[in-house]
Image (cartoon, helix red, strand yellow):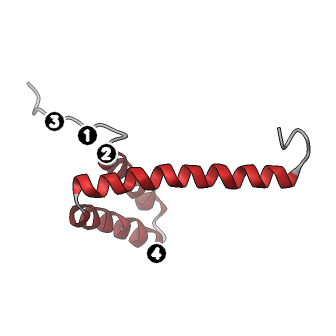
């Protein structure tokens, strides 16, 4: 409505409040995840994933970065309970 009314001040204010609300919800979920999974496990796994993404970017390897980032986002989604872990492979029978 703010955009339709061509009211940039109202649009900015609504964007700010929406962002703050989303950050509060995300932070609550992340804090819950830390308590459930454990800070050390999350830090170890996610730090390694961050390093993989950053190394690929630093090397100018867009394909490697493109492969590494979804793996990290999937791990975060699993840790936070938004996504179920993939079932292990059964070996073909």
Q: Is disc 4 surrounded by few (<14), some (14 to 19) or many (20+) residues within 10 Å?
A: few
Which residue lies under the disc numbered 3?
Answer: 89
Q: Is residue 82 above or below residue 42?
A: above
Q: Is disc 1 surrounded by few (<14), some (14 to 19) or many (20+) residues within 10 Å?
A: few
Which quarter of the picture shows residue 12? bottom right
Mark-to-mark CA distance, 4 and 2: 27 Å
Mark-to-mark CA distance, 3 and 1: 12 Å
Local SS, label 4:
helix
Q: Is disc 2 surrounded by few (<14), some (14 to 19) or many (20+) residues within 10 Å?
A: some
Q: Quadrant of the N terminus?
A: top right
Label 2 near label 1: C-beta < 8 Å?
yes
Q: Which mark is first along the chain, 4 or 1?
A: 4
Which residue lies under the disc numbered 2?
Answer: 78
Q: Quadrant of the C terminus?
A: top left
Mark-to-mark CA distance, 2 and 3: 18 Å
Mark-to-mark CA distance, 1 and 4: 30 Å
Label 3 near label 2: C-beta < 8 Å?
no
Local SS, label 2:
helix
Mark-to-mark CA distance, 1 and 2: 6 Å
Which-is-in-front pick, marks 3 and 1?
1
Which quarter of the picture shows residue 13? bottom right
Residue in the image at 26% along x and 64% along y: 39
Q: Is residue 85 above or below residue 27?
A: above
* Residue 17 point in image, percent of width and height: 67, 52
Which residue lies under the disc numbered 4?
Answer: 58
Mark-to-mark CA distance, 3 and 4: 33 Å
């Amino acid at each position: 409505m703010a955009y339709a009314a061509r009211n940039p001040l109202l649009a900015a204010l609504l964007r700010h409040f929406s962002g703050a609300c989303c950050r509060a919800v995300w932070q609550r979920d992340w804090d819950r995840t830390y308590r459930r999974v454990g800070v050390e496990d999350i830090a170890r796994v996610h730090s390694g994933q961050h390093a993989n993404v950053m190394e690929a970017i630093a090397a100018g390897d867009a394909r490697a970065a493109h492969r590494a980032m979804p793996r990290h986002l999937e791990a975060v989604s699993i840790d936070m309970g938004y996504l179920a872990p993939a079932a292990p492979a059964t070996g073909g029978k």
